[in-house]
Amino acid sequence: MRAARALGAVKLVLLAAAVVLSLLPTAIALNAVLKDDAELAGQQHWIPERLTLDNLARVLGDSTVWGWVGNSAIIAVGVTAVVLVLGVPAAYVLARREFPGRRAFLLLVVVTQTVAPAVLIIPLFRMLATAKALNTYGGVILVAAAFVLPFSIWLLTGFFAEALPREVEEAASLDGASGFVFMSRMLVPNSVPGIAATAIFAFMYGWNEYIFSLTFLSDQGMWPIAIGASSSVGMFSVDWSSLMVASLVGTIPVMALFIALRRPLESGLGHTAL
């Protein structure tokens, strides 16, 4: 009994430490937002000497910041849509059909995640230039979706394999239901947690997308919030107040979506495709 209580206490301490470490960057950013420029440029104190909302009002009143947020939303929603449209049918075939090389293909899907995006920047740039897709949302969305799609297929395959017994699919087939009908009317509704987990994963990837947008978007008006916030960092100085406010604004939508769908996301991370 004492050992169980001690173990429970250790778990609570570790959980509390994890929560503190997770919230610390947000607390530091909020702390910087509430300080005036003089204190930010001089001696730092954890408790601001003079609380001010001037920096917050200045940045939030800038339409450019909200334009960055809108651009991030376009990219994130686009990546999510592409991943679900392509990932759901692919995962259905991998989960419900047996064919030679299936397991090897699944392993290959995971191996693709080891390729760093920076390695492929130059060939991707040339491909988009040839397709006249540079400086377009579509080019960024397609490239970003290509990198998030493999893990999404892996995640969905695990859910689709366990969502319904194969006997149900066989019975549906005997009743004349095609594979598409079974997938759309029976399998997908019974795999909502997995689809939600995949959607939030793809959305977060698209929202935080940085390297492709920085490389392929030359129009600053099309920049997402991740690049817009970093534009506060100059060669010789940093506008800390603008950087922190923009970072907080860009974080809030993702945090809200993550909290709303945290249970499906947690259940999705507990599945495997093999």
Image (cartoon, helix red, strand yellow):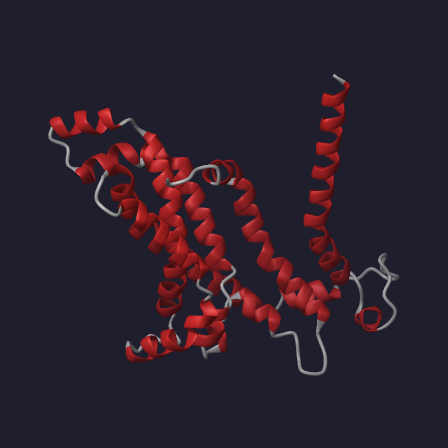
As drawn, which residue projects farthest toward the bottom?
236
Determine the residue positioned at 38% across, 36% down: 192
Q: In which quadrant of the rendered view does residue 28 lie?
A: bottom right
Q: Can residue 100 be seen?
A: yes
Q: Quadrant where the C terminus lies?
A: top left
Q: Between 67 and 138, which is closer to the camera in this rendering?
A: 138
Q: Please state the horizontal and vertical placement of residue 158, each as a whole percent of the image.
A: 37, 38
Residue 20's place in the image compared with 237, above or below, is above
Q: Can residue 88 be seen?
A: no
Q: Please state the horizontal and vertical placement of residue 244, each as a whole percent of the image.
A: 68, 64
Q: Quadrant where the N terminus lies?
A: top right
As drawn, which residue projects farthest toward the top?
1
Q: Please state the horizontal and vertical placement of residue 173, each as a whole percent of the image.
A: 15, 30
Residue 26's place in the image compared with 103, above or below, is below
Q: Please state the horizontal and vertical placement of residue 174, each as a whole percent of the image.
A: 12, 26
Q: Between 75 and 215, which is closer to the camera in this rendering?
A: 215
33 lies left or right of 94: right
Q: Between 231 and 195, which is closer to the camera in this rendering?
A: 195
268 lies left or right of 99: right
Residue 259's place in the image compared with 59, above or below, is above
Determine the residue positioned at 21% across, 29% down: 169
Q: Between 53 and 124, which is closer to the camera in this rendering?
A: 124
Determine the residue positioned at 42% across, 41% down: 196
Determine the residue positioned at 44% across, 63% down: 115
Count how many numbered circles sit on residues in the image.
Answer: 0
Q: In which quadrant of the rendered view does residue 98 lie?
A: top left
